[in-house]
Image (cartoon, coloured by chain):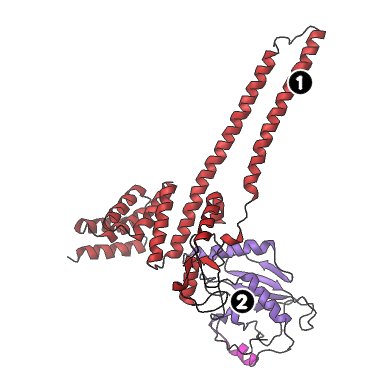
Amino acid sequence: MAKPTFLKDEGNRRFQAGDYVMAEALYSQALIVDPQNPALYTNRAMARLKLSQWDSAIADCASCLRLQPDSMKAHYSLSQAHLALRAHDDALSHALRAHELCVAAADKSLGTITAHVLRCKKERWDERERRRVREMGELEEEVVELLERGREAAVRELGGGDEGGDGGEGGEGAVVREEVEEEWRRKMERVREVFERARPAQEKKRVVPDWAIDDISFCVMVDPVITKTGKSYERASIVEHLRRQPQDPLTREPLYPSDLRPNLDLKQACEQFVEENGWAADW
Amino acid sequence: MPVQFAAKRLSKELQKISNSLPPGIMLVSAEDLEEWLLDIKVLDSNPLYLNETYRLKFRFSSTYPIEPPEVVFVKLPDRPIPIHPHIYSNGIICLDLLGAQGWSPVQNVESIAMSLQSMLTGNSKNERPQGDEEFVRGNRLRPRDIEFYYHDNDV
């Protein structure tokens, strides 16, 4: 009966040593003997993540969650796999769930998971931003092309053909044509101007407001908590500090993790800020 | 804490102080995220420090800013060790802010440099700590492992 435990321990040992192929095989053997053990699924999922086997890692997480719906590790691994597959919404929702479970369990991986949540937000924003830039570029090209066609049509309407013209009459036609062309050129310039003006506006305001930044990690806050003095910090940072020294960082008054309260309004403000300025997650 | 925690925070601090630092504080080098050098000057006319520039060396561990950095004055031909009842002649500084008890993670490189600057500005005693010679001769410990006794903190 000790066999699956032995296989799991051996798998963990191989995992620690960086031999993910062997670790994965050992977890698989253990699962044959003990298929109801949720920890074996999450361990194998972690090995599969290391091997870039995203789909099978997702399947392991799903198996674990069927047995143990509140597994923080399963949600965290699931998020990593979805992130690798660019399923950004799924990646973020599982990251947030893992964070929630991590806080509830006062687990030591809060710092790692907080950083992962920010990364999910950043990548989701990057993806949207890339799409937006591409679509804007395409739109600009299309509009310019339409204008170009409009100009050609207008010139054609003036009655083409008077190219190798006959003296006076041809001269007047050429002047009219020039006016028409000039008018279209101005239109095109204006359109380009409008697109140009829309561009730098995005770049300009790349400043993270101080209220969104945790004074300990200097990152944008994901889960701000407020102390008795009214100052807010990222939960992962302040908890790490309090573990070493149960004092308010500013006043040095006694402060314990149980004194911390979530700052929901600030959390929402930070979420909205990152939603619109995903680059800030990496600032 | 994730491994890159310290690195991330330090690179942000660096970005900030490369753009602006208070008067009398200059960044000399920060080639990696382990050791930075800064110069400080006392701005008023305190005769103890007039026309002198002092070199500070910051060393960061991977637990920064949860743990304090190690900060010492460095002696160079044109960079003496400032005279102060809390600064040993080998550059080791006795300041509660830099000790495990006095440190707070909301402090940063800039705020430490400013504290040291004002520690010098406010001093009028032309003396080293008690037992300086003996300490400098005998000490093999790194600053953060020394148990300072923070007497007269109001200096």
Q: Residue at x 71, y 74 (%)?
A: B40
- The tint chain A carries is red
Quadrant where the image shows the C terminus of chain B: bottom right
- The tint chain B carries is purple
Q: Measured along the vertical axis of the image, is residue A113 above or below residue B120?
A: above
Query: Do discs 1 and 2 share a chain?
Result: no
Q: Which mark is residue A179?
A: 1
Q: Measured along the vertical axis of the image, is residue B113 above or below residue A177?
A: below
Nearer to me, A128 or B32? A128
Q: Secondary structure at mark 2?
A: strand
Nearer to me, A253 or A218? A253
Q: Which residue is mark 2?
A: B71
Q: Residue at x 71, y 26 (%)?
A: A185
Q: Position of residue A151 (x, y in %)?
A: 67, 21
Q: Is residue A238 left or right of residue A30?
A: right
Nearer to me, B38 or A162? A162
Report which quarter residue A283 is drawn in.
Answer: bottom right
Q: Residue at x 61, y 26 (%)?
A: A145
Q: Position of residue A69 (x, y in %)?
A: 30, 57
- Packing grade of label 1 (10 A; few <14, some 14-19, many >=20) is few
Q: Please, what is the three-letter code of the amino acid marked with disc 2?
A: Val
Nearer to me, A221 or A60? A221
Q: Residue at x 71, y 90 (%)?
A: B127
Q: Which mark is residue A256?
A: none
- Packing grade of label 2 (10 A; few <14, some 14-19, many >=20) is many
Q: Is residue B70 visible?
A: yes
Q: Please, what is the three-letter code of the amino acid marked with disc 1?
A: Glu
